[in-house]
Image (tube, grey):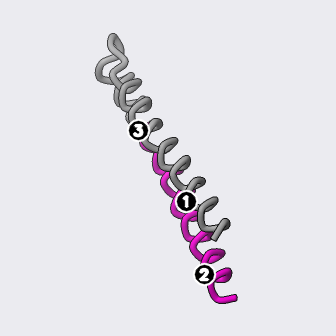
Amino acid sequence: MDAMNSNAGNTKVWSVKMKLKVAHYIVMCIFLSVMNYVFTPSYWWVLWVIAGWGLSLVMELISLSYTEENNERK
């Protein structure tokens, strides 16, 4: 029974952490986009940042979902 409660607690912690990471991603991408527009509007380098960081978040979400599935199977 304790193992089930532990998994539920871990899921909540991961959920909160991921929500914070996504919020941080969105805020920083908006900030960097504004900076890009103000200082170098001729070249949108911020797209590389958005793509790379977004890919990292997607990979982390996929990893998290597989980890949760493995924990549920046990």
Total labels: the figure holds 3
Give the image location of residue 73, x and y in percent.
Answer: 66, 66
Callout 2: SS = helix
Contact between labelled residues 1 and 2, with CB atoms less than 8 Å apart:
no
Start and end of the magenta stretch? Answer: 1-29
Q: Of helix, strand and loop, which mostly describes the magenta segment?
A: helix
Compared with residue 8, is residue 56 higher up or lower down, i.e. above or below?
A: above
Instruction: Identify the residue under disc 2.
Output: 6
| Of the two numbered discs 1 and 3 in the rendering, the one whose residue sits closer to the viewer | 1
User: Residue, x 47% and y 37% (percent of image)?
Assistant: 54
How many residues crowd around disc 2 within 10 Å: few (fewer than 14), some, or many (20 or more)? Answer: few
**Which of these two is toward me, 74 or 6?**
74
User: Residue, x 67% and y 67% (percent of image)?
Assistant: 72
Based on the picture, tell me whether residue 18 belongs to the magenta stretch.
yes
| Of the two numbered discs 2 and 3 in the rendering, the one whose residue sits closer to the viewer | 2
Instruction: Identify the residue under disc 3.
Output: 53
- Badge 2 or badge 3: first in the primary sequence: 2
Answer with left or right where residue 5 lies relative to residue 25. right
Q: Label for residue 67? A: 1
Q: Residue furthest left?
A: 39
Contact between labelled residues 3 and 1, with CB atoms less than 8 Å apart:
no
How many residues crowd around disc 1 within 10 Å: few (fewer than 14), some, or many (20 or more)? Answer: few
